[in-house]
Image (tube, rainbow, N blue to C red):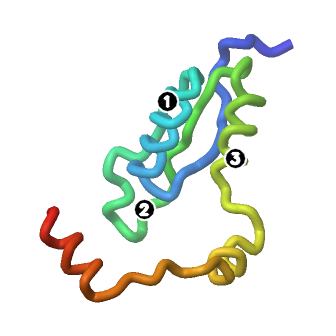
Amino acid sequence: MRDPLESVLLTRALNETAAYLLVAQLSDEGIVATVLGGNGASLFSNALGFPQVMVRQCDLARAEAFRASLIAPEGWEDEAESMPREEMSRDDIDADDEHV
């Protein structure tokens, strides 16, 4: 049986920024996560490997469920395009600019 506190791979990220963002989001959910790898390797187009987001074995199921909830559902683009657009007149836009 695996140690529940053993670190296991949740996912590989495209770059360090994405990895650390996911770690922060997991932390907000009470899931301890860390990043392995990276260290600027993404700066080089020929660098091999991606940063790995690691979680404790005991948190893996929750982390996978949370990560799945972040992924946009199939067909979201069609749904977004079919939504009514807000109509703004030029006066509304100018009024918004004055408050900035």
Please say if 25 is above or below 50.
above
- Closer to the camera, 52 or 63? 63
Measure the C-alpha gap from mark 3 to mark 2: 30 Å
Secondary structure of the residue carrying numbered label 3: helix
**Measuring 66% from the left and 44% from the top, which residue is drawn there?**
67
Q: Amino acid at mark 2?
A: Ala
The residue indicated by pointer 2 is: 47
Q: Position of residue 86 (x, y in %)?
A: 49, 78
- Closer to the camera, 77 or 44? 77
Secondary structure of the residue carrying numbered label 1: strand
**Measuring 34% from the left and 65% from the top, which residue is drawn there?**
44
The residue indicated by pointer 3 is: 69
Q: Going from the N terminus, do you reach mark 3 or mark 2 first? A: 2
Measure the C-alpha gap from mark 1 to mark 2: 21 Å
The residue indicated by pointer 1 is: 34
**Measuring 71% from the left and 80% from the top, which residue is drawn there?**
78
Q: Going from the N terminus, do you reach mark 1 or mark 3 first? A: 1
